[in-house]
Amino acid sequence: MKRGKKYQDAVKAYDKQTQYDVEEAIELVKKNATAKFDETIELHLRTGCDGRHAEQQIRGAVVLPHGTGKTVRVLVFAKGPKADEAQAAGADFVGAEDLIPKIQNEGWLDFDVVVATPDMMGVVGRLGRVLGPKGLMPNPKAGTVTMDVAKAIEDIKAGKIEYRLDKTNLIHVPVGKASFTAEQLNDNFQALMGAINKAKPSSLKGQYIKSATLTSTMGPGVKLNVIKIAQ
């Protein structure tokens, strides 16, 4: 894959084999985020988990202290008073069965997170083939299946993100934007790693976090010192 001059220059600015402390890595990634848009800073973790075992399927959510820097559009499946509550709490879209054909037949997906009250999961389940592959299915572990829709919306709008193991046993999560200060990115990183470390499966044998890389959307990845971040 051919890389641009900015990318090549960024790679020369640091040692690709060195595992950096978080503060150093953040500074390098910020410096290398030279695109004309506000790049997202992402964390990629390679774990020692085996996602084929249910007890090693890591999934959860955490509210980043400084948010993600992204405006999140929330769709809520709810009826009656809970639908009113969702509207009042700032949900972007609220509905029930009426949304099924719009999503299934018209391919409408102008939302980033889906929240549902437990009684609506039978309806939402009919959208499994559409929402599932896109990681949009509500889940109790992520706090998106709940009767307290107002709190769920508030947390999501404040910067709540979900982390989960993918099919290759990796975790990919946003940490913030390149425009954030180093302190803000560090605060978000610590909150995120704190939650992921707590989610370590008790049945796991061997190393939990095998490698960690911090990167911006268009910049090269910077390796992190795994021993220091995996507590």
Image (spheres, grey):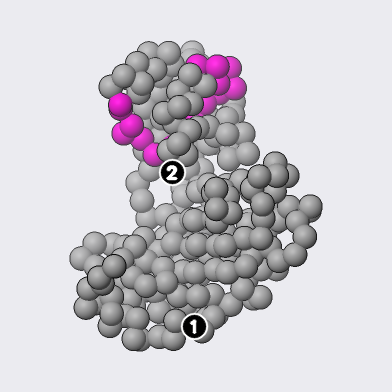
Give the image location of residue 142, x and y in percent.
58, 40
Q: Which residue is mark 1?
A: 17
The question of residue 54 being in magenta is answered with: no
Front of the two marks 2 and 1: 1
In the image, farthest residue toward the front: 1
Q: Residue at x 51, y 84 (%)?
A: 18
> Any mark on residue 134, and which?
none
Above-or-below relation of 139 to 78: below
Helix, strand or loop for disc 1:
loop
| Label 2 Cα neighbours within 10 Å, binned few <14 / some 14-19 / many ≥20 | many
Q: Which residue is mark 2?
A: 157
Q: Quadrant of the N terminus?
A: bottom left
Q: Residue at x 43, y 38 (%)?
A: 134
Count all numbered tags in the image, as a single digit. 2
Figure quadrant of residue 30? bottom left
Q: Is residue 12 left or right of residue 212?
A: left
Camera sees residue 101: yes
Q: Residue at x 48, y 33 (%)?
A: 132
Figure quadrant of residue 217? bottom left
Given residues 113 and 1, the one toward you in this image is: 1
Given residues 219 and 181, the one toward you in this image is: 219
Give the image location of residue 179, x and y in percent.
33, 66
The residue segment tinted magenta is 107-123
Residue type, mark 1 in image: Gln
Camera sees residue 120: no
Give the image location of residue 140, x and y in percent.
62, 34
Give the image location of residue 23, x and y in percent.
50, 78
